[in-house]
Every structure is written in structure tokens, then in C-alpha cells.
Amino acid sequence: MQWQRRLMALLIACCPFAEVGASPASASAFMRLAVVTEQGDTLVDEAVPADGRWCIKWQHSVEHFTVLDCYRNVAGVMQLERSHQPDFAAGLGHIFGRGEQVSDGEGGYWINAINEPVANNRYVLRVGSPAVNHRVVWPGGEHAPVSLSEHAAGQRVTIQLIDPHASPRE
């Protein structure tokens, strides 16, 4: 009986600290979107809350219209959420079973509900020329757009969602 009272007292004393530490929910609440060049220059470093969204926007190199690939922080996992394409041009289009294609009402279409996790929360992009103008945009306007092409045209960059509390990789 004595040990039960001690255990209960310990639980009551520790209860206020139950949320402190590295629980999966608290660790993934805020992540950071980083875009880094091969030389290690950081082009983007912005906070992304849980369910926060950002898009990579660019001009199609052949048809010269705007394309959007939109991502979301889903409990600390980068997911390709949706894509906007105004035409079925070279390299674009909907793949059956991968999201749902719906009209945008202006002759183009959205592919919604792709919800595809990005392996290791990162991918490499070869940044297009200033005419292509790859850029990071924030649909909610949380941060200013950043033109990757202005800073790294023709270079490879790594786009990654990182946990700012995680220890660096060795």
C-alpha cells in the first residue's frame, strides 16, 4: 500500500512535465523548410508549422505557363499535397491513381489529394534559368517568395523539411 501512495505522489508531481521533451507531436509541431545549394549556401530557412504549406512555382520551359507543386508539413513529414498545371504539356499530366484531377475553372487543372510523402523529407532540384524562375512561395503569405533561379540558376539545390531540434547527421 505504501508503494502505491509513493507511485501516485510521483505521478502527480510529474504530470505537469508530461508534455516536455521529445514526444513525436511536440517534435514535429514546427519544422523548418531549408533550401541549400551544393556549396552549402542557404537560400531558404523558414519555420513551417504542423499542416503548414508551401509551393515550388515555375514557368514551364517549353509552354511558358506557371506550374505549382504544393507541399505540406504532415506531422513532420514533407508531403506532395497537390499540383497545378494549366495544360497537358511535355512532362506534365495526371497519373491515374495518384491524386484526383479537377478543373481549375480557367482551362487548367489541379491534381488534389496526392498526399505522397517525400523520401527522407528532401529532394534535389536542378534550378532553372531566370526565365523558368523556380521559386518558393507560401500560399498563406506567411513568408516572402524566394526566387531560387535568381540565386542558383543551373545549380542543384536540396529542398528539405528539417526538425530544428534533431541532432545533426554525422
Image: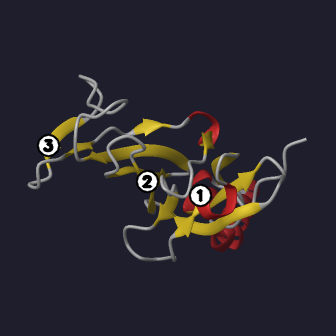
Q: Residues within 10 Å of mark 1 (few under 14, many from 20)?
A: many
Under tag 1, what secondary structure?
Answer: helix
Q: Residues within 10 Å of mark 2 (few under 14, many from 20)?
A: many
Residue that badge 3 annotates: 102
Spatial separation of the CA atoms under disc 2 and disc 3:
20 Å
Quarter of the figure with residue 47:
bottom right
Instruction: Specify whether residue 72 is in view.
Output: yes
Residue 81 numbered tag:
none
Give residue 170's position: percent from left, percent from top.
91, 41
Under tag 2, what secondary structure?
Answer: strand
* Mark closer to the chain start, 3 or 1: 3
Classify 123 as above or below 142.
above
Residue type of the residue flagged with mark 2 = Trp
Spatial separation of the CA atoms under disc 3 and disc 1:
30 Å
Residue plotted at (28% across, 34% down): 89
- Between circles 3 and 1, the one closer to the viewer is 1
Under tag 3, what secondary structure?
Answer: strand
Residue that badge 2 annotates: 58
Q: Is residue 149 left or right of residue 70?
A: right
Classify 154 as above or below 133.
above
Residue that badge 1 annotates: 149
